[in-house]
Amino acid sequence: MTVLVPRSLLAFERAAVDALTDDLDRGDRARVMAYVDGALAAMPEHIRAGVAVESLALGAWTRVTALAHWGRTASVDAEFLDRLDRSPVGPLRQHARLLRSLTLFARHEIAGDEAGA
Amino acid sequence: MTTLDTEVLVIGSGAGGATTAAVLTRAGRQVRVVEEGPAVAPGSVEPFSLEEMVAKYRHRGGSAALGAPPIAYAEGRCVGGSTEINSGLWHRLPAAMAEQWRRAHHIDEFTPEVLDRCADWAEREVTVSCVPDAPPRSSAVLADGAQRLGWHAVEVPRVVRYEQDGAAKQTMAATLLPRAVAAGAEILADCRVDRLVRRGRVVVAAECRRTDGTGERLTIRADQFVVCGGAIQSPALLQRSGIRRRIGTGLKVHPTIKVAARFPFALDHGDVPMHRITEFTPDLALGGSANRRGQVALALADASPEAATAMADWQGIGVYYAAIRSEGSGRVLALPGLAAPVVTYRLTEADMSRLARGLVHLGEALLAAGAVELHPSVIGGRVVHRAGDLVDWWPAVTRARANLMTVHLTSSIGMGEDARAGTDSFGAVRGFDNLRVNDASLLPDAPGINPQATIMAIAVRNAEQALSSW
Ligand SMILES: Cc1cc2nc3c(=O)[nH]c(=O)nc-3n(C[C@H](O)[C@H](O)[C@H](O)COP(=O)(O)OP(=O)(O)OC[C@H]3O[C@@H](n4cnc5c(N)ncnc54)[C@H](O)[C@@H]3O)c2cc1C
């Protein structure tokens, strides 16, 4: 059995980190993104694979709902992530929490963030 | 492919491996230690920082035992193992616990006297001490809160040497490993043992791969093999080598739930609190965690709506925990094609209830110590300002909402003469003439205290017994 895991952040993951760091300058934002990328890549393969499947599904979901709303661009914003955080579906909640935790930790350690997210 | 020979191959260089190597080399054995992680010079990376997670943690700290709820866990992966990233809090195994383990798990020669003698040896080697001056405020608040409630609290000594110019943690890379090298041991860092090669009852070689980017393959032949990869990696290596009987079951952790507490004064954030509230031990312990800015932000995040505002005053916020001994247990399972094992953990209803009780007691102590705002690591958990509101935390600690973690992993192999144990009373793997385990995976149960002292004492005992039987 071989588990295929992505080598870098998937589009949904990138969009989520973007949404959680949109108040940072470009340099800090890139550093936070690189940290989250490295942290996800370093995870045990089965956990990374599970996260990736959810990211793909959520990415597809945001695109479909955007189309249903007359072609609006898919938006992964803080509000969407908050809704995931409160989702009754455990894996979705954990998925949102994971991305939020990695981003939060990095923005405070790397960016010395004053805003506090 | 390179082939190396040695008399004894020790796999893993943490609390168990370094102790094993030190005892064996001093007795004149030719020892080689292989360590999957890199050698990182002591003091070169800031403790509990992001850089430390990259340099010294396995999976950069991102592992979890699957279950409801999942439990995030951390392991070291560098020369010195988890002792390089731990808080160095040092607790000897209480005599009553040793007696209980001896009887319940039929462990021969596992008396408090033997363990004390071995713990004495370890303490002489690593230096165990209390803070010479007043403890940091983040720690003192625990003692203060306990005192106001009439609860028992102690300052836990640490494996730290306090000197004029600061505190130096006495990790394995700073103590036993260099001494073992001085006595003739060789340490091969950046080298992972993928598999042990067996011929009948004998292990003949370890198949290794360099993790320094070269991917070079290596075979190490030895007369004796001692597996010291820790409670997750040791059973995984044995399973990858086809040794599965009673291996990887019975994993125990100390599930831990946290509170971020805001005080109306600044706390220090450079080190971990060394006080512990021991009123409810061994089943429940209350203490303090690493407190850096990133960790404070994380601890605040679960009770999310007020986190951003609270972070503005992060200097006054400390992170504290309630850790339990769990009734439930877990499994480590190495699956073909996966480098990392799958780890699962099942908590019982009683465990969930004990966690809730722990959270409430922790809240009581922190409020008694003067905290003005408590954020539990419970998703959507109520932010509490008065003791009367703590009652809301009881029903909130559910499988869906509790955010748990652990840094204490034990018991995934077990030792003793009873049917559940994967090794005999001294860590010799059943069915093999030259294969032993000597690390956290041998502990028959979670000790309810910081485990390093117990792991090292048992490692000394088992290494001495090995010497007498080879
Ligand atoms: C953040 C943190 C804080 C902690 N705080 C405390 C504390 O304050 N007090 C306390 O008593 N305990 C504490 N602990 C726990 C304590 O550090 C561990 O219980 C103890 O170090 C375990 O010892 P070990 O020898 O079993 O494993 P480890 O010390 O983890 O060492 C195992 C080593 O083996 C290596 N290895 C694994 N598999 C292989 C392989 N196949 N090939 C080559 N090498 C391999 C690993 O990379 C690792 O370096 C803490 C742990 C952590 C993570």
Image (cartoon, coloured by chain):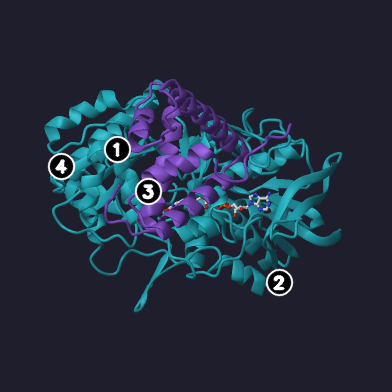
Chain colours: A purple, B cyan
Residue that numbered label 4 is attached to: B149
Q: Marks 4 and 2, how far apart in space?
A: 53 Å
Query: Label 2 amino acid?
Result: Gly
Q: Chain of mark 4?
A: B
Residue B424 percent location from the top left of the image: 67, 39
Label 3 secondary element: loop
Q: Earlier in the sequence, mark 4 or mark 2?
A: 4
Going by the image, does B403 lie left or right of B331?
A: left
Locate residue A94, reporting x and y percent: 44, 32
Q: Disc 2 and disc 1: Cα gap in Å?
A: 45 Å
- From the image, tell me which residue sits under label 1: B280
Residue B184, numbered circle: 2
Whether discs 4 and 2 lie on one chain: the answer is yes
Mark in the foreground, 1 or 3: 3
| Residue depicted at x 53% and y 34% | A51
Q: Is residue B358 above or below residue B51?
A: above
Estimate the spatial distance between the alpha carbons at disc 1 and disc 3, rounded to whole Å.
42 Å
Secondary structure, mark 1, is loop
Residue B361 shows in this picture: yes
Question: Is the Cβ of the residue at disc 3 closer than 8 Å to that at disc 4?
Answer: no
Instruction: Decide: few, some or many residues near mark 1? Use Cα within 10 Å; few <14, some 14-19, many ≥20.
Output: some
Q: Specify the amino acid type for callout 1.
A: Phe
Residue under label 3, please give it: A21
Among the two numbered marks 4 and 1 on one chain, the one whose residue lies closer to the N terminus: 4
Residue A28 placement: quadrant: bottom left
- Check if mark 3 and mark 4 are on a common chain: no
